[in-house]
Amino acid sequence: MAFERSQIYLQCALYCALRPSDATPTQLYGPINFTKLETTPPEQESDDLISNMAGSVGEVLATVQKATKPGQISLECNTMSSDLRALIMSADVEAFNQASATVTDAVIDTALGIWTKLPGEYIAAAGISLKTSGDVAVAADKYLMDRIAGYIKPVDAAAVGTGMKITFSKAAAAGEAYSAGKTKSAYLYLNGKAFDKATGTWGILTVEKASVSNSQAYDWVVGGWMKGALSGPLVTPPGANSPIRFVATDFTG
């Protein structure tokens, strides 16, 4: 070897991509803020040849180690691509697009102090009007609006009635829709730089392929930065001689 290291102190910046085939991805997202990337080697157990001969009954005549479980990976992160986020949520992800549109005189029944669902979400602040079934205008201070989820709540009897008419505009909105609560898994590829603080040198860490799925509960309302965990077996794809490769060099950047 070119040189020896008595200690290694790594700080990594890794990029991530799905690897649905054996081809190595060339377009990756990141770097991902991994707070854990733990790997374990394949589990092995001994397969013993036990003597049944007089004078050595019960003694081991020969033994070999055989693999019983593949190597595993356990990941935790708090930044992620939409694909990684969908895995953490156990969800399908698709584009969400709402075009702007006006809803005129939608008929609703309201009750005092109760939220009533409107036929639309992401409602623009301007252009909201409420009328009674007899087309009498209701002042805006007589009700509350949840314009994001699309609800109205009367706070005065003037906004209460059957066959009330509401007019509003749905705003243009775009994003992602996650259909969660599913059984999801995917093959991941990780690659990026690894800085050894002990020597001030740079290397590269690669996880060739790992079959991962969500491995812990996801709390939707706890607040704070979104985080999640994935785990599963390591895979050695064709063309690689191991599922993980770490190259340590004398390159200082």
Image (spheres, rainbow, N blue to C red):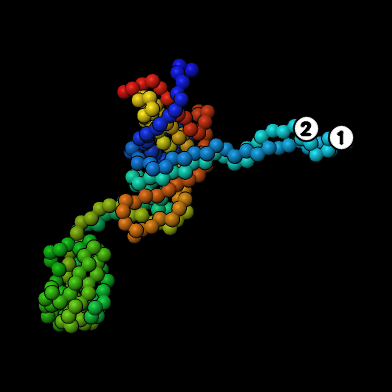
Query: Is residue 163 visible from the viewing direction of this image?
Result: no
Classify the position of the C terminus by image quarter.
top left
Amino acid beneath label 2? Leu
Residue at point 80%, 39% (across, down):
58
Quarter of the image where one finds residue 131: bottom left
Query: Crowding at label 1, few (<14), some or many (≥20) Cα neighbours within 10 Å?
Result: few
Task: Give the image location of residue 81, x and y in percent.
Answer: 34, 44
The mark found on residue 55 in the picture is 1
Amino acid beneath label 1? Gly
Q: Secondary structure at mark 1?
A: loop
Q: Say if 10 sits above or below 134 in the image.
A: above
The mark found on residue 61 in the picture is 2
Residue at point 36%, 21% (across, down):
251
Task: Give the image location of residue 25, x and y in percent.
Answer: 40, 34
Query: Is residue 182 visible from the viewing direction of this image?
Result: yes
Q: Secondary structure at mark 2?
A: strand
